[in-house]
Amino acid sequence: MSVYEYVALDEKGRQCKGFIDATGVAAARQKLREEGVYPVEISQTQQKKDTVLSGIFDINLWQKVSAKEISVFTRQLSTLLGAGIPLVPSFSILLAQTKNTLLRKILAQIRGDLNEGKSLTTSMENFPRVFPPFYINMVKAGEASGTINLVLERLADFSENQQTLMNKIRSALAYPVIMLFIGSLVIFLLMTFVVPQITEIFSDMHQSLPFITVVLIAVSNFLKLFWWLILILIAAVIVVFKYMTKGTDAGKRFWDNVRLKAPVLGAINLKIAIARFSRTLATLLQSGVPLLSAMDIVRNVVNNIFIGETISKAAKEVEEGQGLAGPLTQSGIFPPMVTEMIAVGEQSGSLEKMLNRVATTYETEAQSDIMVMTSLLEPLMILAMGLIVGFIVVSILLPIFEMNQMVK
């Protein structure tokens, strides 16, 4: 099937635009008439060749659907279904108000599949980059239980909660990052423009200079002549680092191990992973997804190989009839408080409630730890910048003082 963009008139003569999925122009016209609109103009959307460059630039940059847009779509679809509007008309309403071109095309294709009698789950499975397995499984459980609007509401709540957590983390780290960038830029400008002009005076005097002044002049000359080489080296280090930590299994395991065991940051990463594990598992279980299927999904959500392997081992033991808390305790990764709360939840039949409490607790702790870390980073960065500037000032003033002594 192809996606067609159309301009049509409704029963009251008002113009409407949108996208529709059909096998051809004639089929598209027929679908539009069945929906009660009269097509004026129909044209097939441009399909770009599937090349490496088009895949990089068109899909990743120009045709991206953000998590926020999916969250808004989920919330709006839940609201429409909860108001009693059928699924296909709900998609038509959302299609009319969606601004993202790629998302409009996707919604048009899903609406076309729904008109053909396919389920919402089957339609969404055609777009795995937009709707991940976690999303698909929840929708599937909602369709099976007849509570799709409630499941979509939980999905929207979950997505908004995760976005709020990540936004708080980003906002906490934004100031130190900006401060580091501006401070580094100022020092670079000092070393490449200001220092060379001042040190020219010393070279004209043909006088022996203090060691720290010699070091300053050497560093300044190096930065002035080879700044481009430094940029290339930084870019190369970033590329190699990303390849080693994401492109190879050994690199992934090494980096995930560092992320868990690094001082300060390791504890924060573990808390974020536990919060994500608990919140995701609770949301899946509340939506009717079986425990084993939910654990298989959560394994890929925590974004850490070692925690994922622990969840996989726990899933195997749960399949053999054991509880969830025992295997997690044996792993040594999950703190005792987490496993004890999970054990209480299993015994009392309120596992979802306990998992949500764990998630809330660890999200709060992670945010608090990040705030403390950033509050300590700021004075340390100021101190480091002050020491560098002080080194520059002393390196310049020391030969001047020596010359004054010689004149006296």
Image: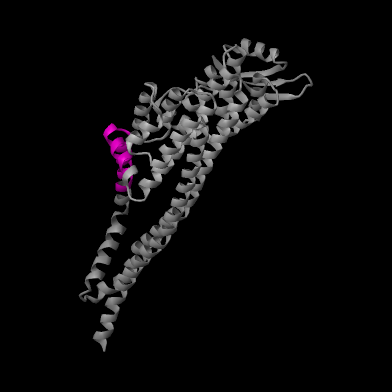
Q: Report the front residue among 372 and 6.
A: 372
Q: Position of residue 180 (x, y in %)?
A: 41, 56
Region rendered in magenta? 233-258
Q: Report the front residue among 150 and 224.
A: 150
Q: Is residue 405 left or right of residue 348?
A: left
Query: Total number of numbered labels?
Result: 0
Q: Position of residue 344 (x, y in %)?
A: 46, 35
Q: In what quadrant of the picture does the N terminus appear?
A: top right
Q: Report the front residue among 101 and 277.
A: 277
Above or below 303: residue 149: above
Residue pushed farthest front? 347
Q: In what quadrant of the picture does the C terminus appear?
A: bottom left
Magenta span dominant secondary structure: helix
Q: Is residue 99 left or right of residue 270?
A: right
Image point (34%, 72%), residue name: 393
Is residue 68 visible from the viewing direction of this image?
no
Image point (41%, 37%), residue name: 339
Q: Is residue 297 magenta?
A: no
Q: Report the front residue among 403 and 288.
A: 288
Q: Is residue 252 left or right of residue 147?
A: left
Q: Position of residue 43 (x, y in %)?
A: 61, 19
